[in-house]
Image (cartoon, rainbow, N blue to C red):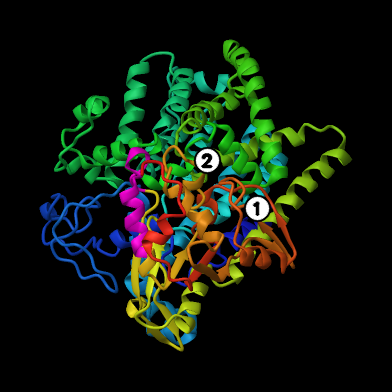
Amino acid sequence: MLVGIILLAAFFRWRGLNWDQLQHYHPDERYISWVASSVDFLRNESFADAFTADQSTFNPFYWPAEVDSEAVSVLVDEPRKFAYGHFPLYVGVAAENGVSGLFALPALQALSEQISWFSALTLFDRVTLVGRWMSGLYDILTVMAVFLLGRSLAGTRVGLIAAAFLAVTVMHIQQAHFFISDPAMAFFVTASILLLVWSLPPKQEIFDHDPNPFPKWLFWAGVTTGLAIGSKFSAIMLGLPALIVIIILSRQQLVWRLTKYGLIVLITFFITNPFAILDTSCALDFGESGAVLEGLIPGACYIDNISAQNVMVNGGDAFPFIRQYDGTLPFLYHIENQVNWGMGAALGYVGFIAFGIFTVLALWRGIRDLRVETFDSIWVKGIILLAWCLPYFLTTGQFHTKFMRYLLPLSPFIMVFAAWLLNQIRWDGGRRLAIGLVFSFTLAYAIAFSSIYNQVHPWQAASLWMLNNVPSQSVVVNEAWDEYLPSSVLVDGRRINRNRVNIQDVNWLSRSGALDTVEKLELNLQTLAEGDYYVIPSNRSYGVAPRLPGRYPNSGQFHQLLFDGALGYELAFVQDRPPRIGPLHLVPHLFDWPNLSPPAVMTDYYNARLQLMLVRADESYTVYDQPTVMIFRNTGKLSAAEMLELFELDNP
């Protein structure tokens, strides 16, 4: 059964890795691949240069002085921002080097056209594909770790159920298709908790020979914790479950045991993220709130990037792309999106209910078992799990910014809790029925979601439509903070460059509040008046500005006027690719939350097919691999002044 579960997980995670026709539509992934294309472990002239911030060819915080990167332009000899885990970056580069070297062998080239196709790609494309494959591998390993964790906690059946649930969890399937750090972090977090649980054998086995043991599993837990932090800094919260385990194990010399564990974590982190310590060239400006951070390593670029991410997750105004979370409820918004989209209703409801029930029982019974030193009970082990889950959820859930992927390191444990709860059903028939229904519903949803990889990406489809319908040198207006279309496309083996049209942009999300002025509106409308086509790549702008009149009193009126045809633009093209089972499309409701009426052509597009219009979805769930794109043609040719008269100006 476990082999079947692993194969099922591999099928979903490695299917459709070229989901965007290598157009690099995920912005975080695109940046990581951009940096990866300049990383070279072997080109340094000396060992000293390799670990000198502005000389090394593998420092994520500095563009190398000399770099030969295929297909993309990179900066040279300049500092750079890198807010992602270094360890997945390095592993992705090393994996690409290994795969490319292997596939370059003439014997393999002759065996398969797929190998020849891969070898002909640019480095930028190759590292993206291999990085996606590695993300899938991390998540497959997470499925295996969840099985072992469930078995250690409550038996083999619970382990198998939990692994099966995770294998078909849509959020994990989706994130495994992106070359990002979250799947790596989720695996190493799960592995760390598993190893900490394994460090708790029965009491008599602990203290018979050594009153202060340091089990081998605790050593490896320190290693995986270092790798987890090296994948994403928020894994630092693994310190609490480790502290609890070391306190249980150490009757004497507690400080020494903690120091030893901390050194294992730090050494592992330094080996995999050397420039987090070595590069102190950044000029830090944290303000009053960051004084403590700045004092840790003066000038550390790593801390500089962590600080910037902290500002972002707490809703800093400098980041327009997080305005989608204004007005969302802490904790509940995360749960809503997991139940509706990330896990599906059946698994989502069972999982979060189980999380709550297990928390109450583990805290009650686990403390009792600790008092009598019954360290191998399910409830003491449960406390180790909760020492990660509760602080992580309570911290992450209250952030202003609530990307669905932020719960990726929590969901493996929710699968264990769900499996445990369903396994408590004492009637065999009822237990099998409940488990079967939850798994079947989630599997059906996973199949529906994976169907998007059988379809052309909507932005690629839009680009091909524009190639055939938009004359060269036309002015194509795009929305800032979204993907600019058209993309460069391949037609009969020949690349048609996007520069055949004149791409301009309007910016509805920047300059909010008092800065959303008439002058900003006039500038955008002037660009619109001069445009021939207007592209809305996704709901990034119209899903935000209209529902936040306090921030966007003028800009928030634009999209409804556009959809009504009042601005002289008519909808000429629409394309999406939602999950579907056979002819039934599972469509997120894009227009309800911002209180918009869609264009009539959009309504006809929906009505022409069999679909189930569901609830709102978090933008980060839809925008990368299943956006809804609309292209409007300027038929009315209204002037900016004529358009401006249609707005009820907040500050005329």
Labelled disc at residue 168: 1
* The residue positioned farthest toward the top in the image shown: 371
Q: Residues within 10 Å of mark 1 (few under 14, many from 20)?
A: many
| Of the pair 157 and 600, the residue shown nearer to us | 600
In the picture provided, is 57 more to the left or to the right than 553?
A: left
Residue highlighted by disc 2: 407
Q: Residues within 10 Å of mark 2 (few under 14, many from 20)?
A: many
Magenta part of the chain: 510-527
- Residue 426 forms part of the magenta stretch: no
Q: Which residue type carries mark 2?
A: Leu
Residue 39 in view: yes
- Residue 515 forms part of the magenta stretch: yes
Q: Position of residue 267 (x, y in %)?
A: 29, 38
The rendered magenta stretch, by its main secondary structure, is classed as helix
In the picture provided, is 216 more to the left or to the right than 580?
A: left
The quadrant in which residue 529 appears is bottom left
Q: Quadrant of the C terminus?
A: top left
Q: Which residue type carries mark 1?
A: Val
Picture layout, residue 497 above or below residue 80: below
Picture layout, residue 526 above or below residue 296: below
Q: Position of residue 167 (x, y in %)?
A: 63, 52
Labelled disc at residue 469: none
| Of the pair 135 and 98, the residue shown nearer to us | 135
The quadrant in which residue 433 appears is top right
| Cα gap from disc 2 to disc 1, whole angstroms | 16 Å
Residue drawn 51% across the image and 60% down it = 562
